[in-house]
Amino acid sequence: MNSRIVVFSCSWDGWSCIDAAANAGMPYPASVTVIKLPCLSGIDAGLILRALEYGADGVLLLGCQPHECRHGRYGENIEVEFDKARQLLSMLGENSDRVRLARLDAFDGTGFIETVKSFNAALESKAKVTAATGNKP
Amino acid sequence: MNMQEIIRQTRAHFCLDCGKCTAVCPVNRFDPRFSPRLIVQKALSNEGGAYDDARIWSCVGCNMCTVRCNYNVSYVELIRHLRMLSRENGTELVYSHGGVTESVMHMMGKDDIKQDRSGWLPADIQVNGSGDTAFFVGCAPYFDTIFKDLNIKLTDGTIGAMRLLNMAGVPFGLLNNERCCGHDLLLAGDSNGFAALGRNNVEERRARGIKKIITSCPECYYTLKEDYPRYVDGWNVEVIHITEVPEIFKLKGAAMKKIKAAFHDSCKLGRHFKMYDGPRNLLTSLAGAELCEMENNKENSLCCGASPWMFCGSVNKQIQDERLRQAEATGADYMVTSCPKCQIHLTCAGMSGDGKYAGIKIVDLYHLAAQSLAQKENG
Ligand code: SF4
Ligand code: SF4
Ligand code: SF4
């Protein structure tokens, strides 16, 4: 069983990695849904929690390296909202690692595939612990 | 509930079309297209419900109209029901803050969550786990994270309230897995979301054998006291507001240097419960402040101007600007409020525009009072 992962990707380097992976024919689980945004700085804790509330197991934020941000936001907004979402999840007694932030260099298809696979594996092992013990890890 | 029942329950059929409600409505002042009278009349007309009128989402729920209405039409209640119908008919809503408050409330409504919500609690606060009285914290711990950009700590007020109870020797416990009271979901017409929170709070109360709840948040107070008995099965709790605890007023403060404070009444504690004097007494006797009244005060107090985390826009901002100007005009050092949400919305309004904070600092009543008492104790 694969985890349902929503990827919010910026349309620059983040998207170029997904594109590179697709062009090279590298597979990733069909349970991954990609949503393309102009820039990750447009994301807020609300959007992240919404995806989880509506049934995603994990949310991956995929964007450029901070100094590469085309919109000059240098990612400061992203980190604030990412931290907020994680803090809110902890308070809600949820696993805060259900949200991940990945910054990749342009056209790093392999990097994208590895990120998604390791995220999927982490989510699945948590899910197994929950199923076995009845407790959230 | 169908339209006829809604009309009966909210007394809308008594409406004489006089327009007093519209004359006093703060939203109407800045957006003349919004008229409570017309919404009541539309609800009464035979052309179907008023629920598909987009303007029902503009009301901030301040209760000014009902106070003025000679026939006591429960306007806020009517709006809540119209919003429920509107949602049932698939209306898409525009959330402020990306809907984060709503998502948190929905996630809190899940039956199997175990929250970790007491990280903010200082070690010196005495919490007694065995009694049948609980202090209801509200969402301040969540707001601290959501609104950290505003540079305010809402739990300061909660901690202040708990300190006052400690100093007055009033014991209380906490509900470890307390859920949001659901005030904002109900005002937004989200009856399912509200029911989930209510059901879980009943479970919490039962598991701990709680018979009495003390709270400092005006909206928790209203919801737990007025809405839970009506809409949530198995509640049966005596709910009191911290300004109704007599022991608090025996404390002696006033050690702080004399400050001038403009008191901002929250709509719920003020116009709804008419509790105007308790908070003011706390402010003068405990915090030792000189009270300054704003142009609109007590029954005529102006709302902090925000709807339940949705459709926040220029009209809301204009109401808030006016309120901040009224506070500044008193020459007070602080604008003091007893409601965490008033503090959030007014701080936010003061910050936007030119990006600077308002000319007056907005502080929480209980925080101020507890600080003043602590200073006295420390000499
Ligand atoms: S004040 Fe009351 S009676 Fe007058 S129009 Fe408004 S709801 Fe109707
Ligand atoms: S509750 Fe307040 S905002 Fe809503 S219609 Fe009445 S006066 Fe206007
Ligand atoms: S006034 Fe309140 S609802 Fe409006 S943007 Fe500010 S914090 Fe959000």
Image (tube, coloured by chain):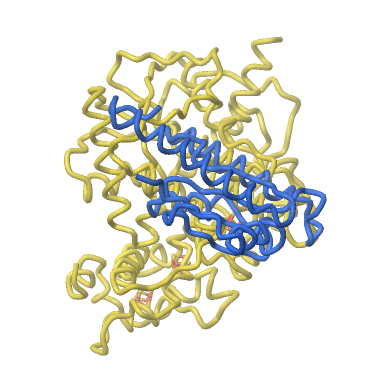
Chain colours: A blue, B yellow
The residue lying toward the viewer, choosing from B266 and B119, is: B119
Position of residue B18 relative to residue B126, above or below, is below
Position of residue B145 relative to residue B302, above or below, is above
Which residue occupies 73% across, 53% down?
A: A64
Which residue occupies 30% across, 74% down?
A: B89
Residue A78 on image: x %, y % = 67, 49
Residue B7 on image: x %, y % = 23, 72
Q: Is residue B317 left or right of residue B12?
A: right
- Residue B256, located in which quarter of the rendered image? top right
The residue lying toward the viewer, choosing from B112 and B3, is: B112
Q: Is residue A20 visible?
A: yes
Position of residue B230 relative to residue B217, above or below, is below
Q: Is residue B302 visible?
A: no
Q: Is residue B288 left or right of residue B203?
A: right
- Count the marks: 0
The residue lying toward the viewer, choosing from B104 and B19, is: B104
Which residue occupies 54% across, 68% down?
A: B26
- Quadrant position of the C terminus of chain B in the picture: top right
Position of residue B88 relative to residue A135, above or below, is below
- Residue B325, located in which quarter of the rendered image? bottom right
Which residue occupies 67% across, 15% down?
A: B376
Residue A68 on image: x %, y % = 80, 54
In what quadrant does ligand 3 lie?
Answer: bottom right
